[in-house]
Amino acid sequence: MLCLCGKHTWDGPLLNGATSLAEISVLWVNVAACVYTFHQVNQIAGYILLPYLAWLSVASALNYVIWRDNPEKKEK
């Protein structure tokens, strides 16, 4: 859940690289399941969700590249 106000706005657990990759992967699987299920009920409804699934794929790849290229600093 996103907190828009408060002390811990930008240092939450989902802003960790590996955790955010896991979270977006779970979201991708859920949207893919929705596409499949909606397509069985109404084909157009399933097709309408395909751009969102494509965007999640791009966002996942971008998230991975940023995480890979910015290793966490070791504290002394």
Image (cartoon, rainbow, N blue to C red):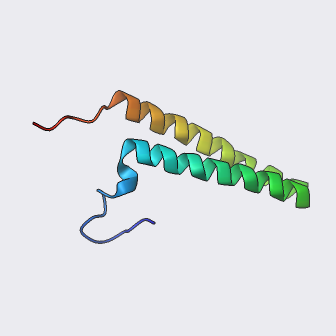
Q: Is residue 62 visible?
A: yes
**In this rendering, position of residue 21 left or right of residue 6:** right
* Image quadrant occupied by the C terminus: top left
Residue positioned 81% across, 51% down in the render: 36
Tell which of 17 and 44 is nearer to you: 17
Residue positioned 44% across, 31% down in the render: 65
Residue positioned 30% across, 57% down in the render: 10
On screen, 31 above or below 62? below
**What is the quadrant of residue 57 in the picture?**
top right
Image location (x, y in percent) of residue 29 = 66, 49
Residue furthest front in the image: 76
Image location (x, y in percent) of residue 11 = 29, 56
Image location (x, y in percent) of residue 63 = 46, 39
On screen, 2 above or below 72? below
**In this rendering, position of residue 72 left or right of residue 16:** left
Image location (x, y in percent) of residue 44 = 87, 55
Tell which of 57 and 19 is nearer to you: 19
**In this rendering, position of residue 46 left or right of residue 13:** right
Residue furthest bottom in the image: 6
Q: Is residue 42 visible?
A: no
Residue positioned 31% across, 63% down in the render: 9
**How many numbered marks have been drawn onto this rendered protein structure?**
0
